[in-house]
């Protein structure tokens, strides 16, 4: 049986990660990558225990190696039938913070300097109380942590989930999905006709996607939702 959860995430701190760098400006796009959500929700550590998303997860707070291991970490989720979509902003505001640093060579013993050259940068962050929305598809029931942490500053965020009605699967036809998607995860099983690109690492996302393929629909929603079927984590070689 397929379970689909609509998840709302509300920030309790400002959220920062560098989607793009423009000179000294480091900008945060109001979109959450599905890779980041998997780590934040603790799903990477719980792939072998698919019925529970643990409150404590080492990958949410500390990573001993600064080498991405997305394929190794996320492939087990395919085996468990768990998939998380990227998140779009339901409402958000931006804050601009300026940070400064100086030449600290004078702190080193026996090393003199005649200069103290300040430098600075600006970080455009997503403000507290901003809200995001995403979906989790699972072949087993899941429970989720209420609080998670995201971004460079490990910003605190609250997660609220609601399981949607039993999905009805439709045969392949053309439909539009306005939420962001990971193109690597959807293009192998769907014919993508048109989309807008969101440039961000590690894999740029797409949104307002018009595609031909199978999809789920749900009864009892105020607005119709057509969610692509057969999404799973795939990686370019």
Image (tube, rainbow, N blue to C red):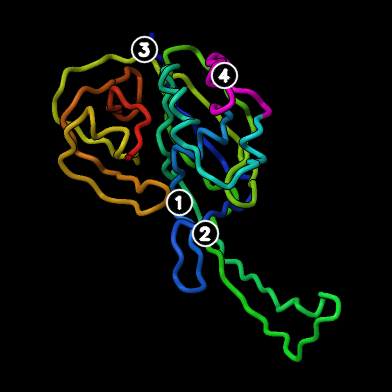
Dominant SS in magenta: loop
First in sequence: mark 3 vs mark 4: 4
Disc 4 versus disc 1: distance between alpha carbons? Answer: 26 Å
Residue for point 56% across, 62% down:
95
| Viewer-nearest residue: 98 or 81 | 81
User: Which residue sits furthest front?
Assistant: 110
**Of marks 2 and 1, the one in the foreground:** 1
Residue 210 highlighted magenta (yes or no): no
Which structural element holds mark 1? loop
Q: Quadrant of the N terminus?
A: top left
Image marks 2 and 1: residues in contact by CB distance under 8 Å: yes
Disc 3 versus disc 2: distance between alpha carbons? Answer: 37 Å
**Of marks 4 and 2, the one in the foreground:** 4
First in sequence: mark 4 vs mark 1: 1
Q: Which residue is mark 1?
A: 30
Q: Which residue is mark 4?
A: 143
First in sequence: mark 2 vs mark 1: 1
Label 4 crowd (10 A; few <14 / some 14-19 / many >=20): few
Q: Which residue is mark 3?
A: 166
Image marks 4 and 1: residues in contact by CB distance under 8 Å: no
Disc 3 versus disc 4: distance between alpha carbons? Answer: 17 Å
Picture coordinates of residue 55, whole percent (x, y): 67, 26
Q: Quadrant of the C terminus?
A: top left
**Of marks 3 and 4, the one in the foreground:** 4
First in sequence: mark 3 vs mark 1: 1
Residue 156 picture quarter: top right
Residue for point 55% across, 29% down:
160
| Viewer-nearest residue: 141 or 189 | 189
Which structural element holds mark 2? strand
Q: Which residue is mark 2?
A: 94
Picture coordinates of residue 124, whole percent (x, y): 53, 63
Which residues are drawn in magenta?
Answer: 43-56
């Amino acid at each position: 049986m397929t379970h689909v959860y609509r998840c709302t995430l509300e920030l309790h701190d400002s959220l920062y990660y560098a989607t793009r760098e423009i000179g000294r400006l480091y900008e945060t796009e109001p979109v959450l990558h599905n890779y980041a959500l998997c780590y934040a929700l603790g799903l990477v550590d719980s792939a072998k225990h698919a019925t529970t998303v643990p409150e404590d997860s080492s990958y949410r707070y500390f990573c001993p190696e600064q080498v991405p291991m997305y394929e190794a970490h996320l492939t087990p989720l395919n085996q468990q039938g768990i998939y998380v979509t990227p998140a779009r902003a339901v409402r958000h505001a931006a804050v601009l913070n300026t940070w400064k640093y100086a030449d600290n060579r004078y702190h080193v013993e026996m090393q003199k300097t005649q200069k103290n050259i300040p430098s600075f940068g600006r970080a455009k962050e997503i403000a507290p109380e901003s809200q995001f929305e995403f979906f989790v598809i699972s072949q087993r029931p899941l429970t989720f942590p209420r609080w998670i942490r995201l971004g460079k500053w490990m910003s605190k965020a609250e997660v609220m989930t609601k399981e949607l009605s039993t999905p009805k699967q439709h045969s392949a036809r053309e439909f539009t999905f306005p939420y962001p998607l990971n193109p690597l995860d959807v293009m192998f099983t769907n014919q993508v006709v048109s989309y807008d690109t969101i440039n961000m690492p590690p894999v740029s996302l797409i949104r307002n996607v018009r595609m031909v393929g199978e999809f789920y629909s749900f009864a009892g929603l105020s607005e119709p939702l057509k969610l692509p079927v057969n999404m799973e984590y795939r990686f370019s070689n």
